[in-house]
Amino acid sequence: INVISILGDINDTRGIIHVVAFSRFIKILTKYSNIEFRILHGNHDNVANKNTSAIQIFNGIENVRIITEPVIMDNVVYI
């Protein structure tokens, strides 16, 4: 497995970031640094407004690609 696509809604409750769950997920992302994780913004990932996403917390993790706008990668369309 080279790529894992997570197709939105990492967060369960809009406007609330679950720190323990996000911390554990960050450990998984960094443990499997040989896999590219593509995380698509979902509607429950909004924090305070439509311009702020809970998944932005994963910015800076080398093997993570945050997708907030439509894009084509490896012949896959992420919307």
Image (cartoon, helix red, strand yellow):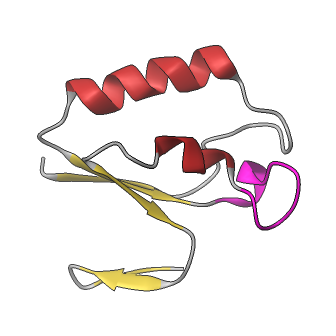
Whole-percent x, y for residue 64 in the image: 34, 50
Residue drawn at point x = 77 percent, y = 67 percent: 51
The vertical placement of 14 against 33, above or below, is below
The picture places residue 66, in percent across and down from the top left corner, at 46, 59
53 on left or right of 10: right
Counting the numbered discs, the total is 0
Q: Quadrant of residue 16?
A: top right
Q: Check if residue 7 falls in the magenta segment.
A: no
Q: Picture coordinates of residue 44 (x, y %)?
A: 77, 51
Q: Quadrant of residue 57?
A: top right
Identity of the residue furthest to the front in this view: 60
Residue drawn 24% across and 85% down? 75
Image check: 45 left or right of 14?
left
Q: Relative to 24, is 17 on the left or the right? A: right
Q: Is residue 65 left or right of residue 18?
A: left
> Above or below — where is 59 with respect to 40?
above
Residue at x-position 74% and y-position 31%: 17
Magenta-drawn stretch contains 51: yes
Please provide percent x and percent y for residue 28.
Answer: 34, 25
Main SS, magenta region, reads loop
The magenta region covers 42-52
33, above or below 38, in the image: above
Q: Quadrant of the C terminus?
A: bottom right
Residue displayed at 26% across by 47% down: 62
Looking at the image, is 55 positioned above or below residue 32? below
